[in-house]
Amino acid sequence: MPEYEIKGATDAQNALLHEIANKFSVTDTHLSELAHEVHVYLTNGLLSDTEPKGLPSRVSYIKSTISSDIRAAKKRSSMALGLTISTSTRRMKLASIKFAPGAPDIINKQVFHIRDNVDSAAKLCEEAAVHMAQFINTHGVHEPVPLGVTIDLPLEETSKCGGRVAEDSRACAGFLRNVDIAQGVDAALLRLHLPVRVTSTTNCVISSMVAAQHHFHSTSAALILNHGINAAYYEAPQKITKLADIALGASEARVAINTELARFGENSSVVQPTMWDHRVDRESANTGFHVFEKLVADKYLGEIVRNLITDFMDAQLIFARDTDVSTFSEPYTFFTSYMTIMEDTSDDLHEVGGLLEAGFNVQASYVDRQIVRALCHIVSMRAAKLVGAAVAGVVKKASEARDDQEPIVVSISGQLTEMNQPYVECTIKTAKRVAHALGLSEPVFNVLGEDGYTVGAALSSFSK
């Protein structure tokens, strides 16, 4: 029996399911080609910012020696603060990390929602300063403390402390474009007479890599599986043709690269979106951009599944004909978090049925439940395999930046690491298989969980 053939389903139901499964299938050859193209895009991205087949590959002032800087800080009593600005979830996260010789690390965290009326860079920085005041008063911070800031937008780092928000093709928080985040936050902190100053500014993927190095010193690459996706790695500065900073270019240590992996696919000859992917792209706020991200990221996976379900509905191959299915017509009502139902192994798929009833007021038959579970699995596994192949391309680039033959250590963080374990497991398995096909040593993966960015931002403030 084929993998997705459902016992008890009609021939028409199984035929449509097989058609969808075939359209979403990816071969090992295709995955190797995708990994190779990602590697090409990363290589070209180091040449200039105008390469048509290149990723932005934004250079950070964070160096691979940050793990040594952190170890040095742990030998003395020291403290640092971290601030995450998440424009996609409209949240700010604050964290403090305190070191004392011979004592365990003390970490405190707090989350704040960004108010709806925050519609300018000045208001955002003022809100960050107000939350910072509450945080340091709660945790008794009185001495001057360094602050690392991280943000989920493309960042052109202009110095170790400063960086301007670059153009973001997701169309998020346009009022932040070209704003120097460090400068704005510092000014707001100064107005409130707070003993805090910004000493580093990074993109979230860089801070997540730093957080991983705190636990696994040899970490050389990082993957974020969140509302969007991104990857980072350490590159030899001598290989970065576009690098303008002479001092950074002369560094013996490797420097962090924010690849902006979400941008991959816009001029790709390998990425192959299906008709359902094209539909999601066409109806998105940034049509034609972030093509790869729309195949694999948390924001879009549930919407792809919803489109597949509506095709079954249009063909009258799912749910009873007198069922009110109007909720399924609303975009983004099938959340990616719902896709955990693909792990339901109960005899009657009780979890699947309960979700459809609670979320969509639909009484689903056993066959209906099997169809929905299968669609979630098809979409999720394709996404995981594509991401795994892309990571193999990043691993190849990271390995070329090293002088030794040690395996590349990759950290994985983000919502999907806790929401969808099969996705993460398939991503790792695929990355290892494709890396082997590329002649690379098998990479090592460490899964950090949902949020290491804020602690990573605090740790980044120790960077020399």
Image (cartoon, helix red, strand yellow):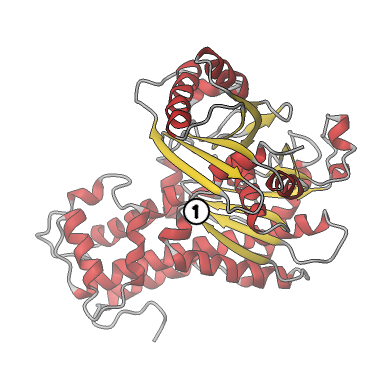
Q: How many marks?
A: 1
Q: Give x and y (percent) for residue 9.
A: 25, 78
Give the quarter of the figure containing the N terminus: bottom left
Left or right placement of residue 296 versus residue 201 in this view:
left
Q: Give x and y (percent) for residue 139.
A: 46, 35
Left or right placement of residue 306 versus residue 58 in this view:
left
Q: Is residue 409 above or below residue 112?
A: below
Residue lying farthest to the top in this orientation: 191
Q: Nearer the viewer, residue 254 or 13?
A: 254
Q: Secondary structure at mark 1?
A: helix
**Residue 80 visible from this viewpoint:** yes
Which residue sits at x=67%, y=25%? 162
Q: Give x and y (percent) for residue 359.
A: 21, 54
Residue lying farthest to the left in this orientation: 322
Splitting the image into 4 quarters, where does residue 409 fall?
Answer: bottom right
Which residue sits at x=87%, y=40%? 251
Q: Give x and y (percent) for residue 50.
A: 74, 33
Residue beneath disc 1: 295
